[in-house]
Image: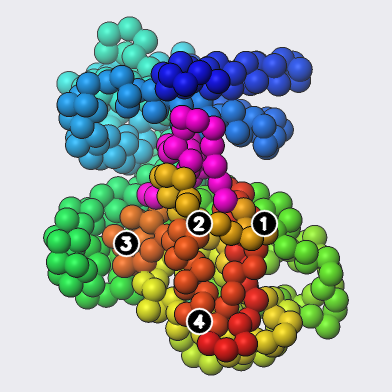
Amino acid sequence: MSNDPLTALVSIISSSVQNLQKSYSEQSLKLPTLDERYIPVPLDNDSQIKDSVERIVAAATQLIAAVRYPRDTIHEQAQSMYLSALLAFVVDVNIPEILNEVHNKSLHAKDIASRIGCDPSHISRVLRYLATRHIFKEVVPGEFANNRVSYELIKANNKTVAELQEKPLEKYADSGTAAFVGHAVGEGLMSSTALSDFLKSGGKHAKTPFNAAFNTDLTLWDWFTTSENSWRFGRFVAAMHHFAEGFKDEIFVNGYNWGKLTSNDVVVDVGGNMGTVTMALAKAFKEPKFIIQDLSPVISQAKGFWEEYDFFTEQPIKGAAVYFLRFIIQDWPTSEAIKILKRIREAANPSSSKLILFEFNVPYACEDPNTYPESIEVRTAPYPLLPNLGKGGGPNPTYVDIQMMTMLNGQGRDLGELIALGEASGWKLEAAKNDELSIFVFSPMWVF
Ligand SMILES: C[S@@+](CC[C@H](N)C(=O)[O-])C[C@H]1O[C@@H](n2cnc3c(N)ncnc32)[C@H](O)[C@@H]1O
């Protein structure tokens, strides 16, 4: 590997592309192109393919940052709100679906505009902005088509444009990425305008940037349940469902030695919501008894092994073999996260219970100077990539961290912070594994 960073980055890109070419050709598959719709293939789950894609993204982004004039990089990034806003616009007015429905799959901006009652010049400018960023394709001047990226915006509920236009408040149900974009912009972009004041006040300016931006004292969850926001809540649920679906069952099934548990053992999914993780585990392991806990409005819709529970009250299930929490701790500031974990520690059997957190590990953007036991896996990447793989690092734990801060005053945590959180609530981190999501296994500390 060359010591010159540019040559080293080009060489990572080149070897990773060759790896993709070889693997696709061995399976007689066509390599992805920007013009064609992405069709999932079994190779997508191959860890070497994922590594290659991550490295290409990491190295290409780093290469661009290294050679581009800094002023251009900053100008582009400071204006990235337009990208978010326009993505939400095209999703809102169903442009990806309109293009997909026409016979030859491309349409002039004036014809798109007439179908949605907008100004033709606005539409061509919006689509040209996006096509310049590889979202949609400008086929001939003023005429646009979907490409690999914009196809992803087509609502996954397969509704026709007429159906989407007839009941606009229902269009996000089961819509996948479209709901994710709608929530990210509808609630997230709006809230982000209050982020700077929140940060400058050390978090005292308002409970959260979301509270300041929407002029409400309600938590995001309570605000969603008000009648005027029920359509937003529906969109959020669809967005979260889509986000959670991205994590394959194997992450949870292989994340712990569940096979050693017997029919006397209990596994508690604390704040389990729809029980997605429990379902994956219960399919793979028949022995332990599974219990899902959540707040009463969630539980009232559920049957079977769901039980009502509030994180901040006494944990009713004593001495379970495993208490696990997915995407819970990141929703809360450290003071509250400690309370949640302490309630579980008080109920745990000090010599046999385990606590498992399925969370993003938000890794440093530099080498981790600490040493850890072998059972705690630390991510790293080849020179000269950032050790956390920068933009190539999976679904970007750093944006989830800032999103949690903005909406909930929550926090994505690095390894050191998770170890400290455990120790403050009576749990010692024993093992950590990194998949698309990280798995942290804790044992009770005797004294806390
Ligand atoms: C981000 S969701 C995660 C759901 C689930 N663990 C998953 O990964 O799909 C957070 C969950 O915490 C639940 N929750 C929020 N506050 C709670 C509380 N005080 N006690 C119990 N559950 C709570 C919510 O109802 C929601 O189901």
- Residue depth check, mark 4 versus mark 2: number of the one nearer the observer: 2
How many other residues sit within 10 Å of disc 1, few (<14), some (14-19) or many (≥20)?
Answer: few
Asked if residue 171 is among those painted magenta in the image, a careful observer would answer no
| Location of mark 3 (residue) | 405
By secondary structure, the bulk of the magenta-drawn segment is best described as loop
| 154 sits to left or right of 279 | left
In what element is the residue under mark 4?
Answer: loop
| Location of mark 4 (residue) | 425
Q: Nearer the viewer, residue 58 or 122?
A: 58
Report if the CB atoms under discs 1 and 2 are less than 8 Å apart.
no
Mark pair 1, 2: CA separation: 12 Å
| Upstream in sequence: badge 4 or badge 2 | 2
Which residue is depicted at the point 57% across and 78% down? 427
How many other residues sit within 10 Å of disc 4, few (<14), some (14-19) or many (≥20)?
Answer: many
| Upstream in sequence: badge 4 or badge 3 | 3
Query: Disc number at residue 182?
Result: none
Three-letter amino acid code of the residue under disc 4 = Ser
The residue segment tinted magenta is: 378-399
Q: Is residue 250 positioned above or below 417 on the image? A: above
| Upstream in sequence: badge 1 or badge 3 | 1
Report if the CB atoms under discs 1 and 3 are less than 8 Å apart.
no
Query: Disc number at residue 374?
Result: 1
Report if the CB atoms under discs 4 and 1 are less than 8 Å apart.
no
Pointer 2 residue Cβ closer than 8 Å to ligand 1: no
Which residue is depicted at the point 45% across and 58% down? 414
Quadrant of image for the N terminus? top right
